[in-house]
């Protein structure tokens, strides 16, 4: 006998049993079709191993959502730095760097030019009332970001650096971490230098 016509989206198992039930569903209405598909999906996944725990599934979805938000955030930052005020910032700019640049524009921050022992000048942005410790932290953050953008690099021991070197301004050591930079007379675009500590 000729086989009955089956819609292409209905699976045909074979003669008898489940196959006949599937073949009959097109004539029983949409509700039966939906129920049949759900039943087939259940049979197809029954032997596929234990179900993924709900907590793991939720965690995976949360990680995906976080990644998507991070990507959107980076895209927004990339568009933002096209502004003439921020055009000097790198493409992988952070919100912290944007905040510093805006603070500079409004006079709430200043740039301190740190001269490294090798003669390289590092421009570091700090707030107007920053302390020596704030400058050290900002310098460390600046170097870490630059190394990350260059694909890693040599690990620096900052404890060793501050044990071995002083920061100086006009020949005066910035020896008190709690003291404000302006108390040493440091203003916007002034230059401080590293100088090696003398052994006692």
Image: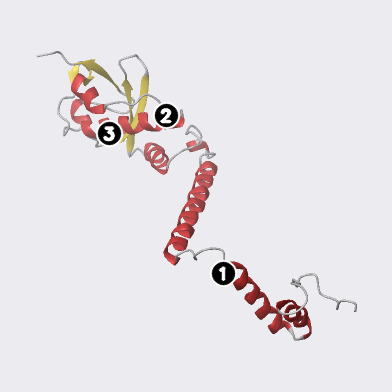
Q: Between tags 2 and 1, which lies in front?
A: 1
Question: Which residue corresponds to mark 3?
Answer: 137
Q: Position of residue 5 (x, y in %)?
A: 86, 76
In x, y percent, where is residue 59? 43, 59
| In-front residue for pair 54/25 | 25
Camera-nearest residue between 188 and 159: 159
Q: Is residue 15 left or right of residue 95?
A: right
Position of 99 with respect to 52 (left or right) is left
| Sequence-first tag of 2 and 3 | 3
Residue at point 38%, 36% (across, down): 104
- Tell me if label 2 and label 3 are in contact, CB under 8 Å: no
Tell me if residue 41 comes above or below residue 159 in the rendering: below
Q: Residue furthest left?
A: 200
- Give the number of the disc on residue 152: 2
Towards the viewer: 199 or 77: 199
Q: How is the image coloured?
A: secondary structure
Q: Position of residue 34 (x, y in %)?
A: 67, 78
Inter-mark Cα distance, 2 to 3: 19 Å
Label 2 crowd bin: few (<14), some (14–19), many (20+), radius 10 Å: few
């Amino acid at each position: 006998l000729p086989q009955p016509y089956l819609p292409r989206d209905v699976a045909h198992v074979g003669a008898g049993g489940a196959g006949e039930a599937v073949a009959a569903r097109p004539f029983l209405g949409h509700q039966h079709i939906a129920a049949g598909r759900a039943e087939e999906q259940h049979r197809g996944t029954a032997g596929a191993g234990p179900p993924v725990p709900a907590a793991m599934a939720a965690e995976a979805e949360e990680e995906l959502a976080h990644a998507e938000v991070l990507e959107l955030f980076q895209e927004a930052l990339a568009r933002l730095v096209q502004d003439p005020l921020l055009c000097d910032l790198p493409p992988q700019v952070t919100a912290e760097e944007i905040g510093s640049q805006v603070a500079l524009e409004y006079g709430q921050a200043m740039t301190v030019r740190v001269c490294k022992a090798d003669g390289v000048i590092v421009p570091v942005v700090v707030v107007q009332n920053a302390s020596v410790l704030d400058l050290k932290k900002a310098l460390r953050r600046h170097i870490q970001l630059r190394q990350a953008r260059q694909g890693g690099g040599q690990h620096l021991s900052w404890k060793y650096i501050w044990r071995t070197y002083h920061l100086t301004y006009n020949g005066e050591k910035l020896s008190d971490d709690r003291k404000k930079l302006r108390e040493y007379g440091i203003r916007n675009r002034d230059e401080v230098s590293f100088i090696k500590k003398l052994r006692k």
